[in-house]
Amino acid sequence: MISFHYETKFKLNPERTFKSWLKHVILSEQKKVGDINYIFCDDVYLHKINLDYLNHDTFTDIISFDYSIGNVLHGDIFVSVERIADNAKKYNVSFEEELKRVMAHGVLHFCGFKDKTKQEKTTMRSKEDEKIEMFHVEQNKTKQQ
């Protein structure tokens, strides 16, 4: 089950569209949906997690903790809404597109994709783009129902 939690005033709308999209993202990678929690927060909240758990004294847009077992994905994905807004401006994209990119990025890590090397980053970006396109298909399905 995919769940959304909020440590900030931000709220996904509509949640069901995002849940459906993320399920399709996972299935498209031949994985199964387990318990996945997205926690939306601010920079201070995520910075503390980065310090406490990863010993990194930097701001980031996302931190994922993968508890997957085999092909069943489980984990917690912390997302800084403030960092997404700043990155959207920096990269000249909409907040919504950057949000989808980061949300897909977290679950793609659970699917086994990495982003440490140049080649891994290229593959990850390509996968993110592919999954963002799936959102538009999913959104059109939801509107028709």
Image (cartoon, rainbow, N blue to C red):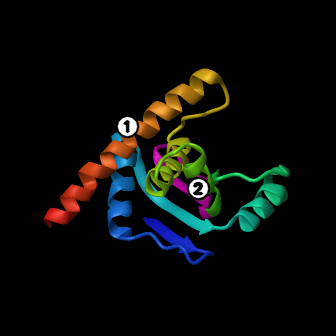
Is residue 3 rendered to the left or right of residue 20? right
Q: Earlier in the sequence, mark 2 or mark 1?
A: 2
- Where does residue 62 sit, x and y in percent of width and height? 63, 53
Report the amino acid beneath label 2: Ile
Pick the quarter of the image with the C terminus: bottom left
Residue drawn at 49 percent across, 69 percent down = 4
Q: Is residue 68 visible?
A: no
Among the 4 quarters of the image, the one containing residue 48 = bottom right
Q: Which mark is residue 52?
A: none
- Where does residue 105 sit, x and y in percent of width and height? 52, 45
Q: Is residue 60 above or below residue 125?
A: below
Prevalent SS, magenta region: strand
Is residue 110 rendered to the left or right of residue 141? right
Estimate how packed mark 2 is, as few (under 14), some (14 to 19) or many (20 or more) residues with alpha carbons within 10 Å. Answer: many
- The verdict on residue 93 being magenta is no
Q: Is residue 73 visible?
A: yes
> Residue lying furthest top in this view?
119
> Which residue is disc 2 drawn over?
84
Report the amino acid beneath label 1: Glu
Is residue 36 rendered to the left or right of residue 24? right
Q: Start and end of the magenta stretch?
A: 66-81
Pick the quarter of the image with the N terminus: bottom left
- Marks 2, 1: nearer the viewer: 2
Q: CA distance from mark 2 to mark 1?
A: 19 Å
Q: Which mark is residue 130?
A: 1
- Where does residue 140 sit, x and y in percent of width and height? 21, 56
Residue drawn at 31 percent across, 46 percent down = 134
Residue drawn at 58 percent across, 27 percent down = 120
